[in-house]
Amino acid sequence: GQNIDQPTEMTATEGAIVQINCTYQTSGFNGLFWYQQHAGEAPTFLSYNVLDGLEEKGRFSSFLSRSKGYSYLLLKELQMKDSASYLCAVKNSGGYQKVTFGIGTKLQVIP
Amino acid sequence: DADVTQTPRNRITKTGKRIMLECSQTKGHDRMYWYRQDPGLGLRLIYYSFDVKDINKGEISDGYSVSRQAQAKFSLSLESAIPNQTALYFCATSEPGTGVFFGEGSRLTVL
C-alpha cells in the first residue's frame, strides 16, 4: 500500500517563498507528482519527479529524495492567485502504475 | 473545449435513484479513471480502466459500477444513490510516463 503525508494548511505572505513538504511510504515507487487545485475546480498538473533532485519550472520548483521518501514543492514570489490546495501524488511501480493522492495542503496567501 | 469532459457538472438527486456520470476525452489516452473527492479525505480512486476490455476496482468501488464504452468514453453509475455518495467526482486520463489529467468535475448531491 501507499501512505502520503503533507501538512493540512499553510499561510504565507504575498511576495514570499513557501515550501510544502510531502513524505511518502510505498511498496514500489515510479514517480511523484504535484498538482494545484483551486476550490471547486479540477486539479491541474504542476510537476513530475522520477529521479532525485530539483526540477525548476518558473516560480515553482519540486524536489525529490527517493531514499528518504520525501519531496517538496517550492513556490517563489507568491501571488494571491497561488492560494489553492497543493496535492502530492505517488505513482507506484506495479503493473497498473496507480497514482495515489495525498489529502492536499491548503495554502492561503495573505497581503 | 476541455480535453476531458464530464456531464452533468452538477446534479441533485434523491436516495435510491440511479445516477450516471459520463466522461469523454479527446486526448487519445488509453487509461481512464474515476475519483471522488471529499473534504479532509482527498481524492480516492473508485474504478480505473487501462483499455476498453480492462476494468479494475479502486479503493472505494462499493456502490458504484462503470462502463468503458469506447477508448474515449468511461461512465460511472450509482445504481441506488445514498447520501454518503454526495461528493465531487472527477474523471481523469493518463498515458504511461505522463501525469493524470482531470475533467472539470461533477458535483453530486444525494438527498
Image (tube, coloured by chain):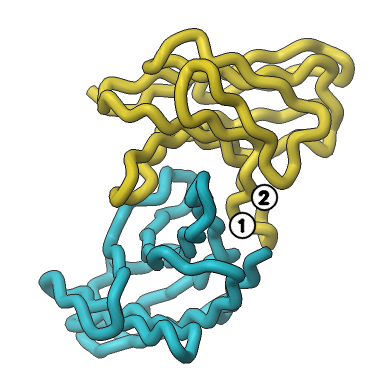
Chain colours: A cyan, B yellow
The number of numbered badges drawn on the structure is: 2
Outermost residue toward the left in this view: A58
Q: Residue at x 28, y 76 (%)?
A: A51
CA–CA distance between discs 2 and 1? Answer: 6 Å
The label shown at residue B42 is 1
Residue A91 screen position, x and y as percent: 46, 59
**Residue flagged by tag 2: what amino acid is it?**
Asp
Residue A28 screen position, x and y as percent: 53, 67
Residue denoted by label 2: B38
> Mark 2 and 1 residues: CB-CB less than 8 Å, in contact?
yes
Q: Residue at x 56, y 17 (%)?
A: B75
Tag 2 secondary structure: strand
Q: Residue at x 59, y 71 (%)?
A: A26
Callout 1: chain: B
Q: Is residue B4 above or below residue A67?
A: above
At label 2, counting other C-alpha atoms closer than 10 Å, the crowd grade (few under 14, some 14-19, many 20 or more) is: some
**Residue flagged by tag 1: what amino acid is it?**
Gly
Q: Residue at x 42, y 44 (%)?
A: A42
